[in-house]
Image (tube, rainbow, N blue to C red):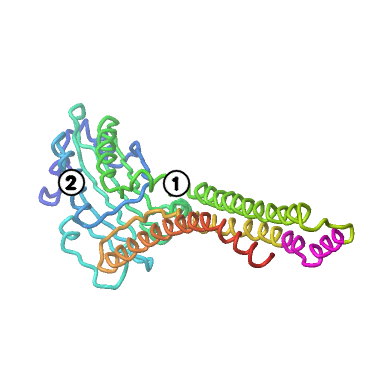
Amino acid sequence: MAEASGVDPKFAVMIPCAQEDFAKFISGLLGKPQSLSRLHRAPFDVSRKEIENTYHLVHQRVVQQNEASLVQFTVRIVYDDSSSVLLNSFDDFLHYNEIRPLTSVGAHLSWTYLIRFPDRKSPEKQEIEVSFIAPSRRSIFGFEDDDEFPFAVQLPTGVVRTNINHTARTWGVDVDSLLDGHIKTFRRKQGALREWITKHSGRVGILAGIFFLVSTYLAGYRAANGFLNEQLLRVQNFAQATDVVPTVSAKLDFMLHLIAEGSWARFSFFVGMSAVFLLLFSIVFGIIVGSFAENKPCSFVVLSERAKENREEALRKESRRWLGFLGSLGADFVVALAAHSVFSHFLSKMLL
């Protein structure tokens, strides 16, 4: 073709297809393929090693199944200062070390292949994209679509997004299934109990507040009932005295004495104030327990020294929050158990 058109052969580009397949070959390169996307809403922990394993897994699967050629592999690393670095090969990624004191918050991997499927006469372009997005507003800057920005803000635990642009649906589904299973190995796993507590943190806080309120009210009721029984016993002892028969005047004096000492007035004030105070405290206590229970695990893209330090600090904070949750629950039980003794002490020492 080059000689027929008068072009020097050494400046010609050889297209790997016959003339009758040229149109299909160009459409396979430039045409708009089908797209298959998936979003993983789960906390993850990704470092350089996990990205290397992902690259080798995808590349081995693609080249083993079909006649494929890797055109380009890129990694875009996004940092917390809104900057990003684009690495145009796997070797560049292996030898890249960030010297700036920045925290990596996103990594966007992209493979571009030319693949000739058994039922096709010419190779076609296939693209695979995997994005690890830590919980940061700026981590989304690695995307080309501005519409993705609000989607990132609403996912505080981090996400992994995969996108496969393909011209063979069976191949696209196979790669998507491969990535789906592989990405699940990056998830940060929690115990079933911790996961349930985190997921239902609001309900846990409400239940803790209700338990505190009911248990302290029951303790207050028992203490108040004891006070009432003691007052009743005083009256019965006076009425049943055998040494002196109480006259009407003595009875009146006894009743005036009870009124004057203010036991019942102080008792009513104490009960009313205690009920209001315990109600308010139970609300505050429920909020505290719920805030500690909402201990959602973070996601990490550890591709810099600062990111490694931040990861360690974040893990320590998560541990402290779990200890705070357990401590708040322990305080709930201790206060509930001690409430009866506290109420009895106040009623006996301050009111009588």
Q: Is residue 149 above or below residue 15?
A: below
Q: Which residue is mark 2?
A: 70
Instruction: Mark 1 vs mark 2: give the one in front.
Output: 1
Along the line of sight, the residue nearer the viewer: 83 or 214: 214
Residue 272 as seen in the image, left or right of residue 216: right
Along the line of sight, the residue nearer the viewer: 331 or 295: 331
SS at circle 1: helix
The tag earlier along the polypeptide, 1 or 2, is 2
Q: Which residues are magenta?
A: 250-269
Three-letter amino acid code at disc 2? Leu
Which labelled disc corresponds to residue 322? none
| Image spot of residue 104 (x, y percent) | 31, 63
SS at circle 2: strand
Pick the quarter of the image with the C terminus: bottom right
- Residue 80 placement: quadrant: bottom left
Q: Report the predominant secondary structure element of the magenta stretch.
A: helix
Q: Which residue is mark 1?
A: 199
- Residue 257 placement: quadrant: bottom right
